[in-house]
Amino acid sequence: MLTDEYDDLRKSVESFAREVVAPVIGDFYERCEFPYEIVRRMGAMGLFGLPIPEEHGGMGGDYFALCLALEELGRVDSSVAITLEAGVSLGAMPLLRFGTDEQRARWLPGLAAGETLGAFGLTEPGGGSDVPGGMRTTADLDGGEWVINGSKAFITNSGTTITAFVAVAAITGRRADGRPEISTIIVPAGTPGFTVSKKYSKVGWSASDTRELSFTDCRVPAANLLGERGRGYAQFLQTLDEGRIAIAALSVGLAQGCVDESLRYVHERHAFGRAIGGYQAIQFKIADMEVRTHTARLAYYHAAERMLAGLPFKKQAAIAKLVASNAAMDNARDATQIFGGYGFMNEFPVGRFYRDAKILEIGEGTSEVQRMLIARELGLSGL
């Protein structure tokens, strides 16, 4: 049971998603266009500042409040939801967790207001899930400046007109055992040597911004180091644990959206003389969809509860992300089947849901990585 405060937030975002996002997002999706006005209105509502303290321009809420907002947005559209998720989880939260007072004062107010976006440059073209082994981007200190060389791939919110910076993970040296020393460095948008590619042509999330980045002798002040030198990978892991709960919430939203659309459609669509919702085969399919959604929601609620209580939550976050992304993919497939040929049309939300669902099993840790983490937390990795 949600408290009144949480439920009021949920209802507010639900209304915004239905009244503001739903009527127009299909056109943005078809044009592969970033919805700046929607993002501006989300910022005005305070959604980008939900888990950010008031002294930094935020709403003073918590991470679960963000997750509730992501779920409600995800019920209507994942492009808008992932823009919020990445803007907060990958843009603002690392600054809040690890930034200096000066860095927070410079960047957080704009991020919390939704006036600017931050991005996190981690994944590389040849790296994938093997972050430390696949990293080739380097940053060397030279005369009080970091000199960055390398490239990043699949970076969300990195090329919009309101992108303020990208926090770049780079190799800044070697440890005594030969392993790379990874640090995170803030690179403001427009810095010479920092090049943003054209937007990817994507299967889904077509109204969100995703790009490849390159750095060629890109110089930023030494003070742009985010957190401790050599702690970049550890910071990333902590950020990702939290982000998996957020992605689980977004996934639950998509799964619930599939249920919502299917329930509406089976009352309208008639075949062989009756509404298709009267056929047991359809009823069982929607019942299974509802079970998956409910189970996934409980999983992310539990992970968020442990996180807010200061308890270990790595396993619970991995479980939530795995269960919820599977639910989103399975529900999108079933909803498309219920809609038949119309489910293959982008003008219907389930067509977009189907295209958007697959990335949820890949982004912020693949399903295989989640299983590895769960097994490790169960003590199986050393066998």
Image (spheres, rainbow, N blue to C red):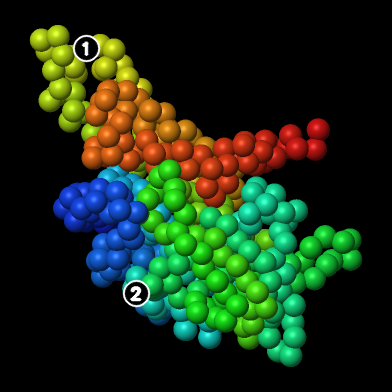
Residue 313 vs residue 360, the one in the foreground:
360
Residue beneath the point at 67% across and 78% down: 217
Vertical order, 122 against 341 (above or below) = below
What's under tag 2, amino acid-wise? Glu
Q: Circle 1 sits on which residue?
A: 279
Count residues near mark 2 (Cα–Cα under 10 Å), then give few for <14, some for 14-19, many for 20+. Answer: some
Q: Earlier in the sequence, mark 1 or mark 2?
A: 2
Element type at marker 1?
Answer: loop
Residue closest to the far bottom: 143
Residue 204 vs residue 42, the one in the foreground:
204
Residue 170 shows in this picture: no
Element type at marker 2?
Answer: loop
Q: Is residue 5 left or right of residue 213?
A: left
Q: Percent position (x, y) of residue 140?
A: 75, 77
Labels 1 & 2 near each other (Cβ < 8 A) = no
Q: Circle 2 sits on which residue?
A: 115
Residue 204 vs residue 89, the one in the foreground:
204
Residue beneath the point at 19% across and 56% down: 20
